[in-house]
Amino acid sequence: MDPGSGDEGPALGQGRIGVPDDIAPLIVYLISEESAYVNGAEIAVDGGFTAHVSH
């Protein structure tokens, strides 16, 4: 399986496995002053996978 190749099909929200460049913007935000008021949050960076899973 090649990450980001799209071979994963509809099982994933965006149809591919995430790559580091997908997560990097969140990391930059979390280490910035703009996130100073964010705490105890669970932030899903999964390409929409959890939005498609029934609970």
Image (cartoon, rainbow, N blue to C red):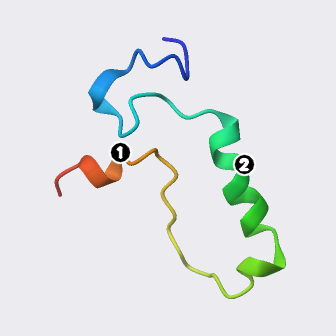
Q: Is residue 21 rendered to the left or right of residue 16?
A: right
> In the drawing, does residue 35 fall left or right of residue 42?
right
Mark 1: amino acid? Phe
Q: Which image quarter is the C terminus in?
A: bottom left
For this orientation, the residue located farthest to the top is 1
Residue 31 is situated, as x and y percent measured from the top left of the image, at 80, 68
The x and y percentages for residue 16 are: 45, 28
Q: Quadrant of residue 12?
A: top left
Q: Is residue 55 or residue 51 the one in the foreground?
A: 51
At x 30%, y 54%, the residue is: 51
> From what the image shows, is residue 45 above or below residue 14?
below
Instruction: Report which residue position mark 2 lands on.
Output: 24
**First reached walking from the N terminus: tag 2 or tag 1:** 2
Please state if 32 lies on the left or on the right of 47 as rendered. Answer: right
Mark 2 → mark 1, Cα distance in angstroms: 18 Å
Residue at figure coordinates x 64%, y 82% from the top left: 38
